[in-house]
Image (cartoon, grey):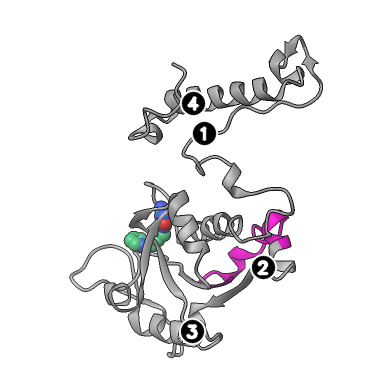
């Protein structure tokens, strides 16, 4: 899939997307990622991208004309239309379902806002989906865009390598993961649960399932709403 990012801080994207699974997905041609600087579409001598809010108030607002030109430029780089996503605390909260929906798109165009956000006319006329990564306010949409790119990349077929599949992980069936252990089997007197060393696969699976249900009930009961009747051992 192709992802285009529109930002005032292209340099922020160097680093987080150049390691591990996202790096390999890009190298393997599974993720075609392009970062574009919105400021290159400013037209005045000072390369202005923002202005004071009509009606007054603190901060600055990103200009609709500059964003329109930037989006037009990016759209013309590839034949797919691209789903335009604006990262904002006012959007629908990102979750596993939305990540999968976005991962099924051939092309995403992510718009990162700074200051007090973008002129609402840009949202109204160009944005297909407004998404929030959580109820807190960051200094810009760059980190949310990177979070989204990372989560979406894991759902591109082949990105996790041969064996691994996002279907087998937390949230695919709406439960938290079971705890994990590795060697040494005992450390400072702290031992690994006996059942995991038993080699009894059915018992191990049952134990893990029970751990997942217990943890979800304790930590995230909201995830169990509407699925209470499923195999709950107590
Ligand atoms: N999940 N930010 C957007 C600019 C802004 C300010 C006010 C609209 C209104 C965020 C989040 C987030 C910081 C991105 C402020 N836009 N984005 N930016 N939480 O905090 O997605």
Label 2 packing within 10 angstroms: few (<14), some (14-19), many (20+): some
Query: Distance of mark 2 from mark 3, alpha carbons?
Result: 20 Å
Judged from the image, the secondary structure of the residue bearing numbered disc 4 is helix
Q: Which mark is residue 176?
A: 1
Check if residue 23 falls in the magenta segment.
yes
Label 1 packing within 10 angstroms: few (<14), some (14-19), many (20+): many
At horizontal 39% and vertical 51% (from top left) the residue drawn is: 137
Q: Quadrant of residue 120?
A: bottom left
- Quadrant of the image for the C terminus? top left
Nearer-N-terminus badge (4/1): 1
Question: Is residue 99 or residue 115 the one in the foreground?
Answer: 99
- Mark whose residue sits in front, 2 or 3: 2
Q: Are marks 2 and 1 in contact (CB under 8 Å)?
A: no
- Against 223, residue 38 (above or below) is below
- Mark whose residue sits in front, 1 or 3: 1
Q: Which mark is residue 75?
A: 3
Query: Distance of mark 3 from mark 4, alpha carbons?
Result: 45 Å
Nearer-N-terminus badge (2/1): 2
Q: Which mark is residue 213?
A: 4
Where is residue 10 shown, x and y percent of the image?
Answer: 58, 70
């Amino acid at each position: 899939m192709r992802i285009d990012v529109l930002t005032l801080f292209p340099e922020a994207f160097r680093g987080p997307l150049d390691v591990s699974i996202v790096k390999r997905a890009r190298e393997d041609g599974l993720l075609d990622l392009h970062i574009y600087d919105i400021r290159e579409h400013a037209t005045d001598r000072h390369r202005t991208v923002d202005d004071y809010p009509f009606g007054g108030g603190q901060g600055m607002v990103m200009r609709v004309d500059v964003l329109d030109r930037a989006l037009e430029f990016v759209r013309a780089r590839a034949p797919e239309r691209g789903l335009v996503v604006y990262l904002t605390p006012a959007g629908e909260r990102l979750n596993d379902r939305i990540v999968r929906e976005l991962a099924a798109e051939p092309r995403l165009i992510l718009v990162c806002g700074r200051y007090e956000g973008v002129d609402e006319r840009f949202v109204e006329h160009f944005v297909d989906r407004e998404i929030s990564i959580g109820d807190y306010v960051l200094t810009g949409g760059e980190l949310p865009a990177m979070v989204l790119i990372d989560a979406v990349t894991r759902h591109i077929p082949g990105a996790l390598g041969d064996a691994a599949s996002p279907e087998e992980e937390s949230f695919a069936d709406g439960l938290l993961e079971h705890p994990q252990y590795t060697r040494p089997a005992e450390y400072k007197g702290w031992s690994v649960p006996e059942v995991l060393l038993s080699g009894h696969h059915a018992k191990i699976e049952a134990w893990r399932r029970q751990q997942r249900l217990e943890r979800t009930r304790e930590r995230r009961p909201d995830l169990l709403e509407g699925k209470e009747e499923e195999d709950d051992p107590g």
